[in-house]
Amino acid sequence: MTGWSHLTVRADPAKRREVLGFVRHALQDANLDEKGLFEIELAIDEAITNIISHGYPAGGGPLTVGVLPGEEWVTVELRDRGIPFNPLLHPPVDVSAPLGDRKIGGLGVHLIRNLMDEIAYEYRDGENILTMRRRLR
């Protein structure tokens, strides 16, 4: 396997397709079936949508995506300089509650938690750093 691949773009909805294409290309040699690749892409899409929508309310700033395919794990790191937000502190969504009783929001974080095996967050030197890992099955 190769080392880290990185892409830095402006956090903008128009860049989502470019980011997901980059991820797909970076993972082309990983031992992933189409379902596993789709689920990783979905988790990344949810995370970058949150960064774009909430991290930079006045307009997009830098967003760096790092991808590390390994023998046993795929690791994805997202870095941004937006508003600090630790998704691990976000309360779990009660998906069994009736729709009318649920609070709006939080489903993206719920999806990320359920699609990835490990998630870590750090705020360092003015950067949000979200690391997501998925075990290759």
Image (cartoon, rainbow, N blue to C red):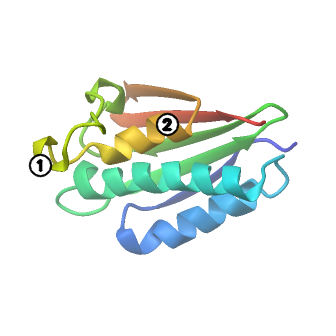
Q: Position of residue 67 (x, y in %)?
A: 66, 46
Q: Which residue is mark 2?
A: 114
As rendered, which of 49 and 112 lies closer to the eye? 112
How far is mark 1 from mark 2, CA to CA?
23 Å
SS of the residue under disc 1? helix
Q: Position of residue 38 (x, y in %)?
A: 62, 57
Looking at the image, can residue 81 be seen?
no
Q: Residue at x 41, y 25 (%)?
A: 122
The image quadrant of residue 121 is top left
Q: From the viewer's perspective, is 40 left or right of 61?
A: right
Q: Residue at x 32, y 46 (%)?
A: 107
Q: Mark on residue 100?
A: 1
Looking at the image, can residue 67 be seen?
yes
Instruction: Pick out the residue farthest to the bottom.
Output: 14
Which amino acid type is marked by label 1? Gly
Q: From the viewer's perspective, is 87 left or right of 15?
A: left
Quadrant where the image shows the C terminus? top right
